[in-house]
Structures are given as structure tokens and as C-alpha cells.
Amino acid sequence: MELVFKEMKKEAQNAYSLIFEPNSEFKWNAGEYLEIKMPHSNEDDRGIERYFSISAAPSEGVVMITTRFFENEASSFKKALFELKTGDKLENVKKPENNDSFFNANNPNREYIFLTAGIGITPVRSVIKEYHLNKRDLKGILLYANRDDEYIFGEELERMTNDMPEFSIQKYHGKRINKEVLEKLLKEYDNPIFNISGTYDFNMQMKDILLNQLKIDSSNVKSSSFGKGYSQS
């Protein structure tokens, strides 16, 4: 599949969304991700392949990926990505199989608890945006942890959830999402599905609390990790 670059917009400090138009019919479910291979000049040892969550909702009609960019630390891949001009094409893009094994927020009768840190908000934005555009009420809560008070998509998420009476957001700046927080939520929500999105370490911490300490059934815990040793490059 090919994606044609349309534009870039800044979401927060060092965080940007790149917006593309597919040049053929492309269907996906909110919360899924893409594999992008991009051969480029002056390739470094970090390679030509990356995985990105799709931060756009399917109903928006565009494909959007959102990522951090630190110029002094950026890989050759990330630099090439950020040098794209309107009309440039990514020619080797695919949606991996079993992509939907992560976020599964399609059942209107279930309640969902999203546990997210930093750039891990990208697939969550896709899910909430899809519900909002289709005027469906998502049931549950988003726990959004961030290192500072500049939350990616923060204001947009607040606006959307204001229209969703059965969904809310709790932001965590400078403090952790811990066992006590999750234990309290289990008293408020009936058999919820937990969707975890963040770095490898964040995912492992959340899984340990849910599966080992709180004994949540593994079928109710979905996760997407940005990889062990994940870097912003």
C-alpha cells in the first residue's frame, strides 16, 4: 500500500502528527498500527523499518501517525520521515496480521479502562475519535500519565469526552498509576477490559499489577508496547 504525504502539524513539544492519504482503499479498525519500510539515503544502523499506531480514526478519511522528534537524537529513518514534502509517497506500508489483538473497544456493552503513558496515547485517540465522530458513547475511563503537563491531544480529548457522559479522563502528571488506583476502579466498573499503551516498562508494570497482583483474567487485558529499549528515534 502507498501513502501520500499531505501535511504535518505540531501536537506538543517535540510531538508531531504526519497526515497521509492512501492512494487506494484502506480499511482499519481504531487502535490498529502500521508497519512502514522507508529506504533512504545515509541509512544508519537503526534500519529502515518502524511500527506506528494509527492515531486517526477510520471515519476521518486520512491516515495519521503521531510521533516524537528530537533532531539531535533522531535516526536517519526519522529524519527522512520528517523531510517528507506534500505529495511524497511512502511506498511500502502494510497493516500487520492480528493487528486487532490490541485495542478491542468495539463492544458497546462493555466498559473499558485505558492505561496510557506519553506517546502511547496515539491509538487511544483513534478509538475515542471514532466513537465521537459516530456519536456513540464509549463507556469507561482513560488514565493518562505524562512526564509534564503538556499532554498530546489533551485538549481535544477533553472536548470529545465532554460529549460522552459515560466516559472520563484522569491525568497523572508527576505521579504513577499504581495498584491502589486500579483497585479502586475495579469497584466502579463491572468486568472492564483494560487496554494498555506505552513503553515496554510501562506495559510490564501495568500487566504485573493487573495480572499478578489483582488477578485480572488475561482475556481482559490488552496491550501495545513500543518495544523493549524503545527510543524516540
Image: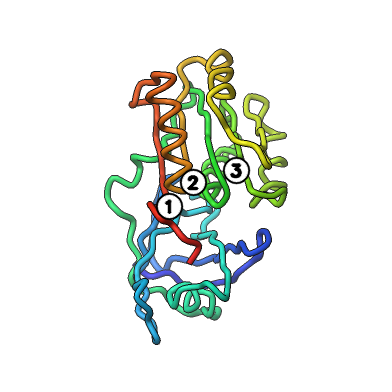
**Chain-order first, disc 2 or disc 3:** 3
Horizontal and vertical percent for residue 228?
38, 52
At label 2, which amino acid type do we have? Gly
6, above or below 193, in the image:
below
Q: Secondary structure at mark 2?
A: strand
For label 3, the crowd category at 10 Å Cα-Cα, with few meaning under 14, some 14 to 19 and many 20 or more, is few
Residue at the bottom extreme of this rendering: 41
Query: Mark 2 near mark 1, Cβ–Cβ under 8 Å?
Result: yes
Classify the position of the N terminus by image quarter: bottom left
**Chain-order first, disc 2 or disc 1:** 2
Q: Secondary structure at mark 1?
A: loop
For label 2, the crowd category at 10 Å Cα-Cα, with few meaning under 14, some 14 to 19 and many 20 or more, is many
Name the residue beneath numbered marker 2.
Answer: 198
Name the residue beneath numbered marker 3.
Answer: 133
**Residue at 41% from the left image edge and 44% from the top image edge:** 224
* CA distance separating discs 2 and 1: 6 Å
* CA distance separating discs 1 and 3: 27 Å
**Residue at 33% from the left image edge and 26% from the top image edge:** 219
At label 3, which amino acid type do we have? Leu
